[in-house]
């Protein structure tokens, strides 16, 4: 690793907060006050402030730091009251030491366009970031290159959910208090006291409130949808927003998706908003209740249907229900958006009188499911045996009799992180064992191949993956058990 340049090290040292090793749980914000002795260029004419700022910036002598303005009022209150301004200078420039001045500064002083004066920059607790404050408060022996500062948390509405390592527990109240200070949207900080799934099959967890009110009724926004739920009763992970979006982007309007472990709807509800039919199921009665509410809240009832069943039995049942809905001629009706309706209203100034508002469009439910989503990484792979007989006796619905392919399954799972393909191959072997057909690592669009993508790092040696594959014909069309 390259050494830090001396000037950068001097700068960081000047702006480092005071080291405070206080008693456990005690936060005295007043101790973070600090005065930094700098030099400033007092600009004689206010009209020249911008020009001198550009000159000093090109000269690399202007102080340019986040959250510190480079243009400040003159330290002399009389001059400041008349609008006098100064430009803060890099710490290497000393007011009483002309030898530290660059030629640009020397010329400015000689022409009396600027003067170099002392300036005391006052910093307090509000200036420093959460990481700055925690480095000041926590003993250095608690930190190493892997753990760093305990800053990661799952964000659910106004709640920050931490999972603190044991060595940080004596400082848990202190950590939570600083976290609240530095994150205005957070009102409550909780800490998990047991692994998800340890005490509940519904992926809920025991927790303790570290700061703020014990109020876990939250509202979260994700992928243009609003979700409300009691965080203590259902599973929610804000760190999966990108994965939710990636999977949703695979769906096409008018397709049918079966979300086997739907939770409160982070896949299902946004998919419904884009015109995708979703049979959404969750085994947790509380998740089902909030799923139903969120479907209505986001006005996707035409597209998303909630269920509260064991995912194992729901897999084949969903295929039957979708087929029956299609045979019954069920459909969704979509019309012009509200914005389009307003623009074409007769009284609208921008209305095109020659263009009529289009008739509502009917989108029929197709007879087959295009995607299955299985986001229960601890055990979803063990559900795969239940795809046997998924479309028994209905071969005529698929290739080569039609253009329709068998469904893609997206199953999430955990596996150790490896530098080679060992973990990916192991996932394929587990899938093979469950479906009863040999599956190998490759492209999900190819027969008997699996695409495996890494989703996120869960722990130092535990990663979350998503394995995607098409249900093999010998599995889909097999006799049902």
Image (cartoon, rainbow, N blue to C red):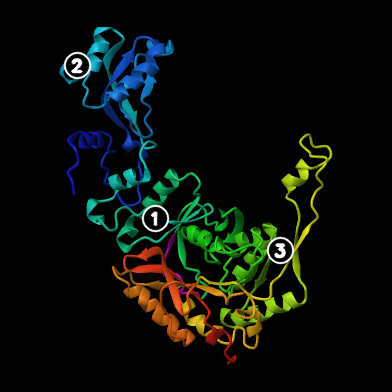
**Residue at 72% across / 45% down in the picture?**
339
Crowd around label 2: few <14 · some 14–19 · many ≥20 (10 Å) = few
Q: Which is more N-terminal, label 1 or label 2?
A: 2
In the picture, residue 266 is in which quadrant? bottom right
Return the residue nearer the eye: 199 or 72. 72
> According to the image, label 2 marks what residue?
96
Crowd around label 3: few <14 · some 14–19 · many ≥20 (10 Å) = many
| Residue 57 position within the rendered picture, expressed as x and y whole percent measured from the top left | 31, 25
Range drawn in magenta: 191-200
> According to the image, label 1 marks what residue?
152
Return the residue nearer the eye: 337 or 242. 337
In the rendered image, the quadrant that contains the C terminus is: bottom right
Q: Is residue 175 above or below residue 105?
A: below
Instruction: Tell me how far mark 3 sits from mark 2, CA to CA.
Output: 73 Å
Whether residue 194 is visible, yes or no, is no
Q: Is residue 445 above or below residue 361?
A: below
| Residue 450 position within the rendered picture, expressed as x and y whole percent measured from the top left | 44, 75
For discs 1 and 3, the disc positioned in front in the rendered view: 3
Queried whether the magenta region covers residue 265, the answer comes back as no
> According to the image, label 3 marks what residue?
301
What element does badge 2 sit on? loop
Residue 39 as seen in the image, left or right of residue 279: left
Residue 422 as seen in the image, left or right of residue 158: left
Q: Which is more N-terminal, label 2 or label 3?
A: 2
**How many callouts does the rendering have?**
3
């Amino acid at each position: 690793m390259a050494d830090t340049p001396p000037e950068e090290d001097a700068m960081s040292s000047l702006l480092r907060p005071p080291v405070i090793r206080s008693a456990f749980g005690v936060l005295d914000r007043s101790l973070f006050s600090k005065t930094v002795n700098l030099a400033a260029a007092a600009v004689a004419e206010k009209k020249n402030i911008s020009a001198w700022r550009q000159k000093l910036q090109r000269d690399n002598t202007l102080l340019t730091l986040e959250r510190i303005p480079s243009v400040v009022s003159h330290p002399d209150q009389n001059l400041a009251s008349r609008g006098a301004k100064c430009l803060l200078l890099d710490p290497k420039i000393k007011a009483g030491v002309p030898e530290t001045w660059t030629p640009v500064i020397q010329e400015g002083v000689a022409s009396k366009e600027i003067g170099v004066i002392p300036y005391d920059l006052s910093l307090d607790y509000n200036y420093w970031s959460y990481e700055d404050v925690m480095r000041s408060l926590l003993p250095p022996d608690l930190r190493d290159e892997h753990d760093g500062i305990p800053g990661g948390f799952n964000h659910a509405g106004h709640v920050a959910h931490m999972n603190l390592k044991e060595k940080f527990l004596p400082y848990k109240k202190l950590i939570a208090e600083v976290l609240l200070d530095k994150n205005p949207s957070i009102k409550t900080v909780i800490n998990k006291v047991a692994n998800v799934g340890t005490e509940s099959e519904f992926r809920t967890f025991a927790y303790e409130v570290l700061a703020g009110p014990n109020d876990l009724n939250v509202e979260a926004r994700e992928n243009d949808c609003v979700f409300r739920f009691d965080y203590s009763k259902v599973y929610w992970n804000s760190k999966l927003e990108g994965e939710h979006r990636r999977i949703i982007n695979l769906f096409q309007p008018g397709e049918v998706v079966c979300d086997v472990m739907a939770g409160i709807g982070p896949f299902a509800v946004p998919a419904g908003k884009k015109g995708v039919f979703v049979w959404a199921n969750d085994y947790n009665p509380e998740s089902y209740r909030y799923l139903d509410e969120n479907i209505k809240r986001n006005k996707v009832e035409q597209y998303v249907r909630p269920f509260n069943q064991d995912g194992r039995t729901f897999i084949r049942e969903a295929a039957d229900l979708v087929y029956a809905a299609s045979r019954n001629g069920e459909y969704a009706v979509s019309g012009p958006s509200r914005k389009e309706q307003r623009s074409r209203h007769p009284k609208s100034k921008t209305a095109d009188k020659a263009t009529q508002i289009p008739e509502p469009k009917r989108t029929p439910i197709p007879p087959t499911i295009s995607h299955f989503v299985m986001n229960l990484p601890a055990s979803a792979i063990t559900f795969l045996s239940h795809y046997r007989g998924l479309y028994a006796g209905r071969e005529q619905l698929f290739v080569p009799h039609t253009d329709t392919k068998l469904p893609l399954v997206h199953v999430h799972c955990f596996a150790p992180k490896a530098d080679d393909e060992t973990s990916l191959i192991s996932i394929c072997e587990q899938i093979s064992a469950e479906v009863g057909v040999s599956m190998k690592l490759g492209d999900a669009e190819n027969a008997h191949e699996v695409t495996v993508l890494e989703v996120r790092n869960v722990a130092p040696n535990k990663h979350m993956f998503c394995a995607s594959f098409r249900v093999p014909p010998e599995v889909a069309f097999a006799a049902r058990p």
